[in-house]
């Protein structure tokens, strides 16, 4: 499985757009990029998954360039409740498990 | 449709005792994963089970830890002779695991084990 690298922490203010970039230089052809969110004292929650270009849902957008060696999770107009740890994962087509890194700790200030 | 249910939410054990953590997957999900999370750290994969089968236990410590997912009832993570280093949050996740990449795994609220 491709190793992922993402910033340890980020700060933002309410109402701003937050972009968290993840590097996965060794991503394979059959790999997908997946993001999870974890609030304190809770289990992770799936946010979004993509293979290439752009994916958008009601929570976030995921941008994946053509070479797929990185991806960017975009959170529009964050609020205090978006304060959490965000994990970038590379998931293979036939993988049997999710491998989490250390994630990015996002702190949103009023 | 209830989510993944874990119990107990909090468990305190003395060194040397046994800890049993239970996980009921979402209805219709036959695949269960267990993870351990130390304070301020990411989640570490422990084991992946299907009904009555252990598929991948590459993250399980060789001794004292075991897991099962019987045909009937919840999945159980069992830790024998607990030590202080076992203190952590243990999360269970389930998925329907259809063919293709894991699109979404649903996590429970976790069991926080404290060994005193």
Image (cartoon, coloured by chain):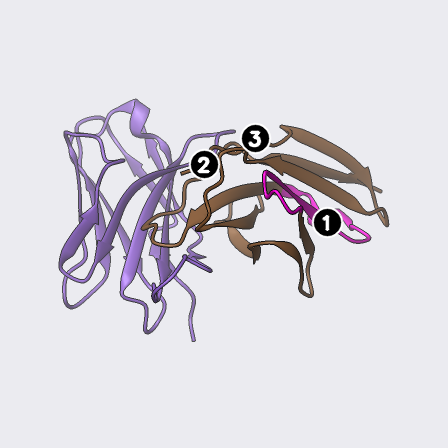
Which quadrant does the C terminus of chain B fall into? Answer: top left
Q: Which residue is drawn at 41% across and 57% down?
A: B102
- Classify residue B83 as left or right of residue A44: left
Q: Which chain carries label 2?
A: A
Question: Closer to the camera: disc 1 or disc 2?
Answer: 2
The magenta span reads A65-84
Which quadrant does the N terminus of chain B fall into? Answer: bottom left
Separation of residues labelled 1 and 3 (CA atoms): 16 Å
- Classify residue B25 as left or right of residue A39: left
Give x and y (percent) for residue B96. Answer: 35, 67
The chain painted brown is: A
Please tell me which residue lies in front, A51 or A108: A51
- Give the SS element for disc 2: loop
Magenta stretch contains residue A80: yes
Q: Find disc 3 in the rendering and name its residue.
A: A5
The chain painted purple is: B
Give x and y (percent) for residue B40. Answer: 52, 29
Q: Earlier in the sequence, mark 1 or mark 2?
A: 2
Separation of residues labelled 1 and 2 (CA atoms): 21 Å
Separation of residues labelled 3 and 2 (CA atoms): 10 Å
Q: Residue at x 72, y 49 (%)?
A: A74
Give x and y (percent) for residue A30. Answer: 43, 51
Q: In this view, does A90 lie above or below A48?
A: above
Q: Which residue is drawn at 67% across and 46% down?
A: A65
Q: Mark 3 lies on which chain?
A: A
- Classify residue A23 as left or right of residue B68: right
Q: Is residue A50 above or below residue A88?
A: below
Q: Find disc 2 in the rendering and name its residue.
A: A2
Q: Find disc 1 in the rendering and name its residue.
A: A74
- Give the SS element for disc 1: strand
Which of the numbered marks, if any, corresponds to residue B4? none
């Amino acid at each position: 499985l491709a190793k992922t690298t993402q910033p340890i922490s980020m700060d933002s203010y309410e109402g701003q757009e937050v972009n968290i970039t993840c590097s996965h230089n060794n991503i394979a052809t059959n790999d997908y990029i997946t993001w999870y969110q974890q609030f304190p004292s809770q289990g992770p929650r799936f946010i979004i998954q993509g293979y290439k270009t752009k994916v958008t849902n009601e929570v976030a957008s995921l941008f994946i360039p053509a070479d797929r060696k990185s991806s960017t999770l975009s959170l529009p107009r964050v609020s205090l409740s978006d304060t959490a740890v965000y994990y970038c994962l590379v998931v293979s087509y036939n993988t049997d498990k999710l491998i989490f890194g250390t994630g990015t700790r996002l702190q949103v200030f009023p | 449709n209830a989510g993944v249910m874990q119990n107990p939410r909090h468990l305190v054990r003395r060194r040397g005792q046994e800890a049993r953590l239970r996980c009921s997957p979402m209805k219709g999900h036959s695949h269960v994963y267990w993870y351990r999370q130390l304070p301020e750290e990411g989640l570490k994969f422990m084991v992946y089970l299907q009904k009555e089968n252990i598929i991948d236990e590459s993250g399980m410590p060789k001794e004292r830890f075991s897991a099962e997912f019987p045909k009937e009832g919840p999945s159980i993570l069992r830790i024998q002779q607990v030590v202080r280093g076992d203190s952590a949050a243990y999360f269970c996740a389930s998925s329907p695991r259809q063919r293709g990449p894991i699109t979404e795994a649903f996590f429970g609220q976790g069991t926080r084990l404290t060994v005193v």
